[in-house]
Every structure is written in structure tokens, then in C-alpha cells.
Amino acid sequence: MKLDQAHLLRQLTKAIPNKGPKITSKSKTTRVVTIASGKGGVGKSNFAINFALSLSALGKKVVLIDLDIGMANIDILMGMNSKYHLLDMIEKRKSIWDVLEKGAGQLEYLSGGTGFNHLFQLHEDERQYFFHELEKLHGYADIILIDTGAGLTKESQQCHLSADEVILLTTPEPTSISDAYSVVKILHSENPAISFQLVVNRVKHAKEGVQVASKFKMVVQSFLDKEIKIFGAIPDDSHVVQAVLKQVPFSIAYPRSAAAVMMKKLAERFVSGKTEEISPGGMKGFIRKLTRILE
């Protein structure tokens, strides 16, 4: 027998103390953005961290959530040993404010951990508790970035379909481009209105970035009749690898590197971009869509 969700949440939250910051601004718009890629190894998580830091440097309140189910590594890339993970929030009934950590550059993030494997295989009471806690971020952050798994797992697909926007990463490699196209094709078939912004990572020079992005845009337009926005291209920079080895984000370790400079430009572009056509639903909208998909 299916549980009444409203009743379930009331029961779950009766004994939970009202922790965390008081969110007084009801007019604050929260944009929920997922980071996607067609295959692993394209630098998705690294992009997520450094993009979040660059947005924070512009004065935006950012929360980074690691939902790369089973392969979470945000804390590792920042050299952090997180006290709590998503599984702790669910199993130990921790508040979102208990598990929200501060990493490099005081970036607030929620670690996925390695024991959290199946978001949608949780018991209904666990899943509803998880959603209830995540919803507390609505109005708390300007931007919530969600790093999902590479490709399209069941969890990542539903997250992308529920977000306000999707930033899609690829590299110039043919396999990466092909897999990225598959992501667009599948998500577009589920929701033709889904918004994509394309980032080409590890380009040898600016011209290569333009060529790859333009060709990808043209193919998507021709075969799917879908408009995809070109967000930018990030140069192949040896400082990125060095920063990973140091477990320090490259935008902090090497702020003048070519990759860090471009990341700053992307953040500025994102913040100054028009959002009227997007109509962000924020974390409440994200949770509402996820719940609807699961019904």
C-alpha cells in the first residue's frame, strides 16, 4: 500500500530539531544545475568543483552536491575527509546542515561517499526523508550544482530531467562526442524542452573548441531539431593534472593558469546570462519533478 507522502514527511520531521540557518528571503531564486557527460574521464567532477569555486568568487552562494552514485569523489579532489556523507543523512537521520561540509575556498558541498549506490532503491520513508532535507536548500543557495555519474544511469537521467539546466561536458575525442550526443538524444526524447549548455574540455587551442562545439550543435539541430547552447571551451592545461595530484582545485592552486582563467570567464558568462527563459524551479521544483517521476 502506497504511503501518503505528506503524512509520511510529517511523521519523519516531528522529532527533528530545527537546525541550520534561518532563510528569510523568499524571493531568492535558486538555480539547480546538473553536470553531465557521455562517458567517464572527461573531467566532469573537476569542472564541477572549479566552476562552483569560480561562481563563489563572483559573490554567488553555491552548494555542490555529489550525486555520482557509487563513484563520488568531490571530497577526494579537494583533499577533504568528509565527516558525513549522504548515506549518513539518510540512515542516521542527520539534518542537511549536519552533513553539509566546507571544502577548498570555503565551498559548501554534500559528499556522496562510496556506500551510497542506489538512490531510487531506497525505502520510501528513506527517500522522502532525503528529499525533505534537500528541499531545505531552496532559497539558501543562489546556485546548486549537482555532479552526477557519467553517462545515463537511472539516477542521473532523472536528475537531469528534474533540473533547471544541464551543463554537458565533452572532449574533442570522437567517442566522447558520440556519447555526449547520446545523452542529448535520450534526455531530449523524454523532455524536448530540456536546456543544455555545452562545454568542450581539453581543447588544444581555441579554434578546436569552436569547431567541435559548432559541429556538435549543428548535428543536434539537424537530427534532433534541438537547439543547444555553446557555453565555452577549456584548454588542455597541464596545471589541471598537477592540481589533481595535489588534491587542490586548479582554480586555487594555479589561479593564473589557462584553465582557471577560462573557468572564471565561464562563471561570469553564466551569472550574466539571461535566466528569464529558464524560469528556475529551484530545489523545490527539482524535488517535485523527481517525486512525480517516481510515482
Image (cartoon, rainbow, N blue to C red):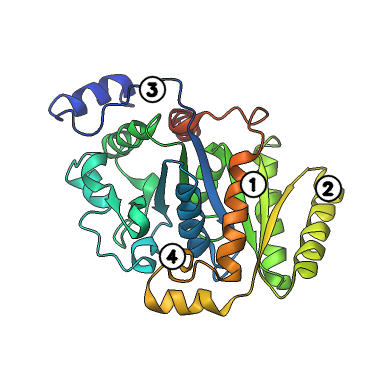
Residue at which label 3 appears: 25
Q: Is mark 1 on a helix, strand or loop?
A: helix
Q: Earlier in the sequence, mark 4 or mark 3?
A: 3
Q: In which quarter of the image is the N terminus?
A: top left
* Residue at figure coordinates x 79%, y 62% from the top left: 210
What type is the residue that disc 2 sits on?
A: Gln
Disc 4 element: helix
Spot occupied by residue 262 in the image (x, y as percentages of width and height): 62, 61
Residue shown at 32% from the left, 33% from the top: 128
Q: Mark 2 points at which residue?
A: 221
Picture coordinates of residue 41, whole percent (x, y): 55, 71
Graded by Cα atoms within 10 Å as few (under 14), some (14 to 19) or many (20 or more), the crowding at tag 1 reads few
Cα distance between the residues tagged 2 and 4: 37 Å
Horizontal side of residue 258 vs 109, given as left or right: right
Query: For mark 1, what is the residue?
Result: 269
Q: In this view, does 221 lie above or below 81?
A: above
Residue 238 occupies quadrant: bottom right
N-term mark: 1 or 2: 2
Query: Tag 3's secondary structure?
Result: loop
Q: Residues within 10 Å of mark 4 (few under 14, many from 20)?
A: some
- Amino acid marked by disc 1: Arg
Q: Give the mark toward the camera: 4 or 3.
A: 4
